[in-house]
Amino acid sequence: MMCLHRIAAVLTDEHRFLLMTHKDPDADGIGSMLALGKSLSDAGKETTLLSQEPLRPPLNLLKGAGQVVTRVDADQVFDVAVVLDCAEKERLGYAADQLRDQLPLINIDHHETNDRFGTLNLIEPESSSTGELVFGVIQAAGLPIGPDVAGNLYAAIQGDTGSFRYANTTARALRAAADLVDRGADPWGISRKVMDSHSLPRLRLLKMALDTIQLHHKGRVAIMTLTRKMLEEAGAHEADSDQFVDYPRFVRGVELGVLIREIGADACKFSLRSNTWVNAARLASRFGGGGHERAAGFTYHGPVTVAENAFLKEAERFLDGICD
Ligand code: 5GP
Ligand code: MN
């Protein structure tokens, strides 16, 4: 808790802030960044919101998304950088190059695997989302929370809890959400904008992806596979498949849902979701990745079929309790 107050004091005392989140950003990272940025600027401070890439739908529809930049001028001066929802500095992608060595760095995150790379670190794995943590930080700092700040924090919490369905949907998360609605967040408007607004290519891609679901290990593992060719055929973007990993997990009897995305000729991105007991972060860490107990990921360097076989071998050992 000490750290919360030290961070709150820095936010109150300093003036020029550089805010960042992880690459391939999600609603939690961007919602947290937009909310903290708006709250700081409403308090009269200078803020720069940096993303590795331009925001895509639906995240570019969040209030204030137009403020996000992909470059910072070399002569721009900051007092402090705040990194949100990012477990390791490497996950910032090339946005990390814009962090200058001497710049004090605040690291706010809820990943168990966060390596505390900041000068000040607020890492709470029991928090549903970074949005929930940022809400606490803004309140501790006595910074303003108008309807746009509330809405973006709500979107962050909603994103990471799968619309208040996942195992991280705690009473504290729900109370934070209710409090944010009191402060002007609009659940229906945000859901329509962020959750229930899809391009037709995305839905076409989903159809193809659903067709690839295969069960393994007595129906306890379900794997969905997405190739570059399928993306091309659907006319979709890689980010369009972001929530697809839920579907293999939805199959009755499945403990571990897996999405394998081909990201290059010789690399694939794994997304893991478990239903009740498999520690997905621990399984992912066997392949150099990480994440949370119920949601984790890693990158595998090799073609999809090789990756799938290597993964299945390890996953089966895990499910059989052979691994610790
Ligand atoms: P997703 O499957 O949505 O990409 O990621 C699920 C969770 O796993 C996220 O919390 C994310 O931070 C984590 N994760 C995904 N990929 C990686 C990775 O390559 N390395 C680490 N350390 N965590 C990852
Ligand atoms: Mn998060």
Image (cartoon, rainbow, N blue to C red):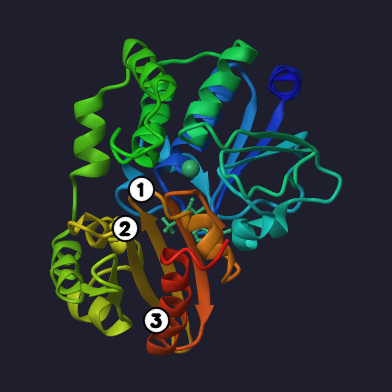
Residue type highlighted by circle 2: Glu
Residue that appears at 44% across and 79% down: 313
244 shown above or below 47: below
What is the distance, in whole Å, between disc 2 and disc 3 at their CAs? Answer: 17 Å
Which corner quadrant holds the N terminus? top right
Callout 1: SS? loop
Residue at 60% over, 62% down: 93
Residue at the extreme right: 102
| As drawn, 270 above or below 167 | below
Task: Find disc 3 in the rendering and name its residue.
Answer: 308
Q: Amino acid at mark 1?
A: Thr
Residue identifier under label 2: 255
Say left or right for 50 vs 233: right
Question: In the shown orientation, is residue 215 left or right of residue 181?
Answer: left
Relative image position of residue 294 (x, y in whole percent): 42, 49
Tell which circle, 2 or 3, labels the residue nearer the N-terminal end.
2
Amino acid type for the residue under numbered disc 3:
Glu
Q: Alpha-carbon distance for marks 1 and 3? A: 22 Å
Q: Position of residue 87 (x, y in %)?
A: 62, 50
Front position in the image: 255 or 15: 255
Label 1 near label 2: C-beta < 8 Å?
A: yes
- Disc 3 crowd rating (10 Å Cα; few below 14, some 14-19, many 20+) is some
The quarter of the picture where residue 76 lies is: top right
User: Which residue corresponds to mark 1?
Assistant: 276
Viewer-proximal residue, 146 or 227? 227
Q: Percent position (x, y) of residue 82?
A: 66, 38
